[in-house]
Amino acid sequence: QVQLVESGGGLVQDGGSLRLSCAASGRTFSNYAVGWFRQAPGKEREFVAANAWTGYRTYYADFVKGRFTISRDNAKNTVYLEMNSLKPEDTAVYYCAARSSWIGVTAPATYDHWGQGTQVTVSS
């Protein structure tokens, strides 16, 4: 079993930056692909970015390409989401999730483990 805890959310102005962290415990993180998702009020949970267990394979949603960067430190059992040039439409609860394979990595239903989420609010 893997337990995930997100941190780093907060309130930031339009154009600002935040770095989210996803810390894992319970089992080694290095065997899992990790994804970041977000959910705004009244909307479905959507894929943001994913990172394979090797750290060299990443995938981003089109709306964050060039602004967000996912990375991991397997020694610290932590995955990061660096968010730059934030916009008000990025406001949501951000979740990290882990799964043991890469195929279908953008689909929330395929993930086995989820964190509790961290709120990101971007003011205009």
Image (cartoon, rainbow, N blue to C red):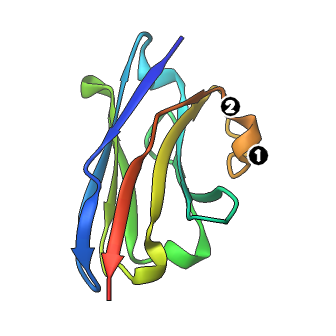
Q: Residue 35, position in %: x, y?
A: 54, 45
How far across and how far down the image is residue 90, in percent?
45, 73
**Residue bearing the label numbered 1:** 104
Front residue (pair 108, 77): 108
Residues at discs 2 and 1 in contact (Cβ within 8 Å): yes
Q: Would residue 19 be visible to someone looking at this image? A: yes
For residue 102, above or below residue 11: above
* Secondary element at image label 1: loop
Q: Which mark is residue 101?
A: 2
Looking at the picture, tell me which residue is in the foreground, 74 or 120.
Answer: 120
Q: CA distance from mark 2 to mark 1?
A: 8 Å
Q: What type is the residue that disc 1 sits on?
A: Gly
Crowding at mark 2 (Cα within 10 Å: few <14, some 14-19, many 20+) = some
In the image: residue 108, left or right of residue 40: right
Question: Which x, y percent locates residue 62?
Answer: 60, 75
Up-down relation of residue 65 to residue 111 (above or below): below
Q: Amino acid at mark 2?
A: Ser
Callout 1: 10 Å neighbours few (<14), some, many (20+)? few
Q: Residue at x 38, y 55 (%)?
A: 119
| 22 with respect to 100 (left or right) | left
